[in-house]
Amino acid sequence: MGRFIEFCLQHKLIVYLLTFFILFAGIASIFTFKRELMPKRNYPWITVNVSGASIPAEEMEDKVTNPVEKEIHSLSNIKNYQSTTTPGNAQVRVEAEDGKGEQVKQDIEAAVNRLRNTFPKTVKTVTVVQEGNQATEVLMSLALSGKELPVLYNLSKTDFTSRLEAIEGVKKVEVSNTNVANKIQVTFKPDQLAAYKMTPKDIVDQLQESNVKQAIGTLKNRSFNTVVEVDNAYKTVEQINSVFIKTPVGNVPLSNLAVTEDMRGKKKDAIFRYNGEDYVQLFLTKTEGSDIIRTSDKVKEEIEKINKESNGKYKMTVSVDFASYIKPSINNLSRDLTLGGLLAIIILLIFLRNWRVTLVISTTLPVSIMMTFIGMKFGGYNIDMVTLISLSLSTGLIVDAAIVVLESIYHLREKGHTLRDAIKQGVKEVMTPVLTSQLTIIVVFVPLVLSNLGGTGFKPIMMTIAFTITVAILASTVAALLFVPVFSNSFLQKDKQMHQEAEGRASGVTNFFVNLTALALRHRIITMILAGCLFAGALMISPMVQMSSINDIDENHVYASVKLQSGETLESALSKTLQIERDFKKIPEIKDLYITTDKQSLGIDMNLIEIKERKRPKEEILYE
């Protein structure tokens, strides 16, 4: 190690060039990181869903479920699979081998796409979903409020869905129809079906055949072409009622066989309210690898355009923005790193009372941080909740090794050693303790990876924590053993050499801790009893420590849920919703109030005014 230190001291230019390269590469890595809510997890569960109008269960099983199961049976890396078939829907759940979920999903997608043309023509939706990764794709929830729910629903399904999905980074927009019915309901009369010797399927097939809207060709003109379209689609309830159905006893109108009811605009299974108005809910997911914050900002820009075009007829707002959970975490990490560096600098100034020594740590700290970011980039990691927590945990560890090495060098300088000799001897004396302590910290995180804590789904999270902290520890070790000696040789050149007698002039802080240590050693039994009391006291007050969740990260968002009594109707739930609206309007800090109600529960999302505008903390508002 002495030869290596001597080489570095003789070729300081190489070390400084390496320093600038690390800083440049680290800053470049920061700007290329994708910001996500959670790391992607390779869950082993894949679900295939196929839906197709009112196809009988027997036909769905014969033409959809069985062919899909046959294809899945021929694939590798599959533990087991099971299927459920109901009228109009087939579902196959597959469990892959550990770590093979993503690969199996791709194989199943390819197999299902090959079968797609053999499915019944009325099959409308075919999806292959890897369960558990929804948290990595969620982007935000939107509310479109106004007076006419059916109009809002249709606008959302047509115009707004296409506009929002056209934004870079947006994968899909799903419009919830839980609270608004947008259909014509046909209820068959069993006695009439028996009298006319008909089945529901016979009638449905005839209705589908007559409800046609199809292009049949193109009319060519000199300067343009016109699409020729046959439009026999149903447009009114009366038109549907008057459709003649062929039966064994003659043609009869549908009204003789069924009751047709217009359900459009009627409350369905839930009630959604935004600041006293009904609204339609839209869920947005993002594409894999897209930046959640950048995508969220683009969506908000499009929302502003939509609201300007509305002329007050409707309003689109953001009820839940998942990017708001990671923004505070990034700010908190920046704050923690800054505070950690400042505290290290202040402590060195207090104990060593030498600004040149402090300058060495001030230079080494950013190099360690940038090496950590470079390691994360090479490891394929991004900025998400898990990596941010890991970096926060390792903030204090980054400067430990550098301080130990620097203090050893400084101590030898106080004894009268030359600077170069103090550097070589100081690093040599503490190298083994530094490497041992750093390796001990790394080994602590090995069980997180090997124990399979939390199951297969949580293994990527544990891997992320272990990898991020390990890289931070390794970066701090390299900085302590490579950069601290070189920086010390440069910054301490003009520092006055201290002699042996300097040891007698210890600072007041040093004297205090020396005397405290001596006192503890003289009264060992009392010290042990005091330590035991402190440990017991910590255990006693641990239940009083306030627990928090991911919802507490966003200081401007509050979520609450209320479980209703069994037997509630939608009407009685609505009355409770209106009462909550009246009560919550009295709280001045609430800017937006979103309430979702069904027969079982109430969900309340509250967006508060900005924290700088609030006179009370969030906890006090929640208590009210």
Image: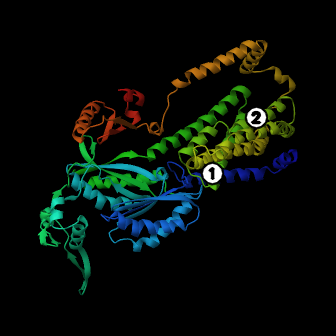
Q: Which residue is mark 2?
A: 404
Q: Which residue is mark 1?
A: 376
Q: Quadrant of residue 477?
A: top right
For the question of whether residue 497 can be seen, the reply is no
Q: In the image, residue 201 lies at what x, y percent?
A: 25, 66
Q: Position of residue 521 (x, y in %)?
A: 78, 16
* Residue situated in front as seen by the camera: 377 or 81: 81
Toward which corner of the image does residue 64 lie, by quadrant? bottom left
The amino acid marked with disc number 2 is Val
| Quadrant location of the C terminus in the rendered image | top left
Q: Label 2 to label 1, Cα distance in Å?
A: 25 Å
Rate crowding at label 2 as few (under 14), some (14 to 19) or many (20 or more) other CA atoms within 10 Å: some
Instruction: Give left or right: position of 149 versus 121.
Output: left
Report if residue 561 is visible in the image. Answer: yes
| Residue appearing at x 77%, y 32% in the figure | 407
Quick check: 120 above or below 615?
below
In terms of image quadrants, where is residue 153?
bottom left
Q: Secondary structure at mark 1?
A: helix
Residue at x 57% of width, y 41% of height: 389
- Residue 605 got which mark? none
- What residue is drawn where x is 22% and y is 56%? 151
Nearer the camera: disc 2 or disc 1? 1
Q: How many marks?
A: 2
Q: Foreground residue, 367 or 69?
A: 69
Depth order, front residue of 253/275: 253
Earlier in the chain: of badge 2 and badge 1, it is 1
